[in-house]
Amino acid sequence: MSPTHSWATAFAPASVGNVAIGFDILGFSVGALGDRVTVSRTGTKGVTITEITGVAGPLPTDPLQNTAGRALLAMHEALQPGFGFAMRIDKGIPLGSGLGGSAASAVGAVVAANALLPQPRSSLELLKYAMQGEAVASGSLHVDNISPSLFGGLVLTVGIDHPRMKQIPVPEGIRAVIVHPQMFLSTRQARAILKRSVELSDFVWQTANLAGFISGCYTNDLDLIRASFEDVVIEPQRQALIPGFQQVRQAAMRAGALGCSISGAGPTLFAWAQAKDAHGVLEAMRREFAAASIAVDEWLVDVGADGAQVVEAG
Ligand code: HSE
């Protein structure tokens, strides 16, 4: 598409952050749901949000208080394009679900705005603008949802000031089971409860698990992935926020999952499973939530959809 559009709409996929063992640095994109953001040129300078529709409840339209608004302001301030941005956001990702909704809006905003620039910027530069949006939602800069939503795939991001990202290969035939209990969990709250320090033994265990998990992905070693798929630092502190967590996780593992953990800050849970086991894992997780009288949304997807793209422009 020509970079001289007067408006553009981008679709940015949802994502599963942390992937159990990569707190704030590892995530994968989920194409089954996402946010659509339309950005138009305006004659007035600055950033405005004209409308927010979709599955999310009331969200602030003050750009400074809005994840997509903050990301677009960062881009506008850095690039001074000589025109303003007006933005419409259509939320497809439930608020406070742990599926990277704030990241998707921020990513959608910068990808759509990029299509209006005479000289579009690199995705790595867009990453820096988009990550400013996360600070609004969670109070801190983290990239585990932003990177997969922007680049697509299972993505490791190293560094904040000078981020480097790596798309990690996912062994053939692995599927992701995603089950969202229909409740709201604040990312800010789920981060606030975390202890500021980690026991040395847990640090060693978690480091080994992250290294083992990534090595297992590169070498198609499903046994190593299964053995490494355990968050010994964050999950034990957050699980009490999710009713039925232990029962759902144990049921997924009994049904043959390679691992099951909290998606981002929760309350969504996700599992990885081989294709032959994936339906059984989904069924097991669904059953446990139903036993706790918790209504859910559910998806069975490939790990790592395409990243954000412009889907319409004029
Ligand atoms: N890595 C973040 C967390 C994801 O777990 O708090 C939430 O957006």
Image: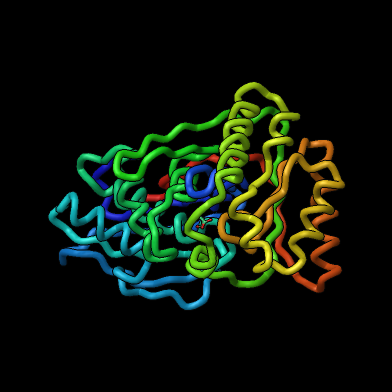
Side of 87 relative to 174 (left or right): left
Q: Is residue 311 among the parts visible in the rendering?
A: no
Quadrant in which the N terminus is drawn: top left
Name the image colouring: rainbow
**Going by the picture, which residue comes out furthest to the bottom?**
58
- Give the residue drawn at x 41%, y 50%: 312
Residue 172 placement: quadrant = top right
Q: Is residue 287 above or below residue 16?
A: below
Report x, y in % for residue 225: 69, 33
- Give the residue drawn at x 33%, y 56%: 132
Identify which residue, 12 or 177, lies in the foreground. 177
Identify which residue, 48 or 210, lies in the foreground. 210
Q: Is residue 43 above or below residue 1?
A: below
Side of 235 relative to 13 (left or right): right
Q: Is residue 66 among the parts visible in the rendering?
A: yes
**Going by the picture, which residue comes out furthest to the top?**
219
Side of 134 relative to 292 (left or right): left
- Give the residue drawn at x 46%, y 55%: 104
Q: Is residue 171 above or below residue 142?
A: above
Report x, y in % for residue 300: 72, 48
- Give the residue drawn at x 42%, y 52%: 142
Numbered disc total: 0
**Going by the picture, which residue comes out furthest to the front?**
200
Report x, y in % for residue 223: 75, 29
Report x, y in % for residue 79: 18, 49
